[in-house]
Image (cartoon, rainbow, N blue to C red):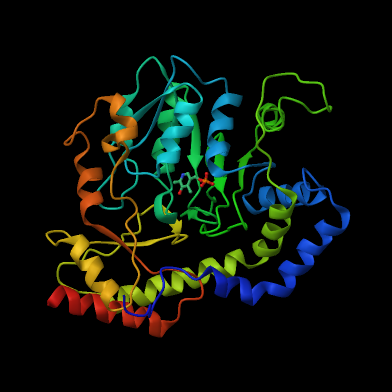
Amino acid sequence: MPATRVPFQDLPLQIRNLRPEIDAALQAVLAHGEFILGPEVAIFERQWAEFCHVTHAVGVGSGTDALHLVLRALGIGAGDEVITVANTFIATAEAISYAGAKPVLVDCRIEDYLIDPAAVAAAITPRTRAIIPVHLYGQPADMNTLAALAQKNGLALIEDAAQAHDAAMADGRVCGSLGLAAAFSFYPAKNLGAFGDGGAVTTRDEPLVRQLRLLRNWGSVVKYHHEVQGFNSRLDTLQAAVLSAKLRHLADWNDARRTAAGWYRSALAGCPGLVLPVEAPWTGRHAYHLFVVRLPGRDRDSVARELASRGVQTVVHYPVPIHLQKAYADLGLRQGAFPCAEAAACTILSLPMFPEITQSQVAYVADSLRAVLAG
Ligand SMILES: *Cc1c(COP(=O)(O)O)cnc(C)c1O
């Protein structure tokens, strides 16, 4: 393999830049030793709730658990249906399965890869209890239409905001505040990432908060007294300390991602055979977790290989939609069920995107991609 000229992302660089702040945060936790639900967890929860313009955040073990525990806390389970989109990370569907409910998949819009509200409307049955839109790649789903649909049908609207820290609608409302509850992931590679797994639920619903605090801690608030059967899924104190330190930089990092997206757009404008990401009319602030282009009519995998041979790392998010995964064969859905999700899976490519990416790195990626597509 040739040397990497542009990595897909560069977490070690980000951590080198923050080392003194991170070290201080970690040292404080090591000094008091309250590694589980220590004071830094409540501090971060308050900061994260404020950042998301809601009253509460509940730290949990991962983004997957955030989704799972919200469904449990709402009493959604066996016999219930939850609608989500076919082109997401598998965790969205698995959280529904963990709760005992059935994931009902629908197609996305090909323009922006976001869940199609018309398809959601068509999938609602008397068993439907909730809709989980995914703010894919950092762009809010069509939450105005989905909220109206949820309201009309008495359904819980739960955001999968794992890729959308600080994304916002055109009217300024931020992801994490747009439904009954939202699930965030702090997996290291997300826009706000811990040094391991972590997640949070944001909501304004007090009874839900109480239930989530029980469920994440074996059903107990008072030690050794268990009100319900729960789980072991807390946000670690060390991770909360890291997240508070990194949160101070999140808005600037997302600005830098948007700047990089702008560089890509000008460098790749008019490139034949290439479809750039589209910002939907309702989007106010795209978080550019990923910068995903589409290469219709091309052999995407060979383009990715040629880019790799020029030292450019790319990834596909995601190559197989949920309904075509072996893990979900029991849904009984075949090729052709969701044409847009399937078309996207075959043609999308995520280009390097991280806050520290330089203009010359973006130029190198764009030049390489133009050369590969022309060749
Ligand atoms: C990362 C991610 C998750 C899962 O989060 P974890 O913290 O890794 O469990 C769920 N949904 C989407 C869309 C994601 O990108």
In the rendered image, the quadrant that contains the N terminus is bottom left
Q: Where is residue 261 in the image (x, y as percent from the top left)?
A: 39, 70
Q: In which quarter of the image is residue 149?
A: top left
**Residue 21 pos. (x, y %):** 73, 70
* Point 45% across, 60% down: residue: 289
- Please determine whether, in this image, residue 226 is positioned above or below residue 166: above
Q: Where is residue 17 in the image (x, y as percent from the top left)?
A: 63, 77
User: Of all residues shown, which one is farthest toward the right?
Assistant: 32
As drawn, which residue projects farthest toward the bottom?
Answer: 360
**Total residue callouts:** 0
Q: In this view, does 339 lie to the left or right of 191?
A: left
From this viewpoint, is residue 122 visible?
Answer: no
Of 1 and 58, nearer the camera is 1
In terms of depth relative to the viewer, which is nearer, 149 or 76?
Answer: 76
Q: Residue at x 50, y 19 (%)?
A: 77
Quarter of the image with the C terminus is: bottom left
Q: Is 299 on the left or on the right of 123, as rendered? A: left
Residue 47 coordinates in the image, percent (x, y): 71, 53
User: From the viewer's perspective, is residue 7 above or below residue 189?
Assistant: below
The image quarter in which residue 222 lies = top right
Hey, which residue is sitting farthest front in the picture?
1
Q: Tell which of 277 and 195 is nearer to you.
A: 195
- The answer, for residue 328, to whether it is visible in the render is yes
Residue ID at (50%, 46%): 161
**In the shown orientation, is residue 46 left or right of residue 222?**
left
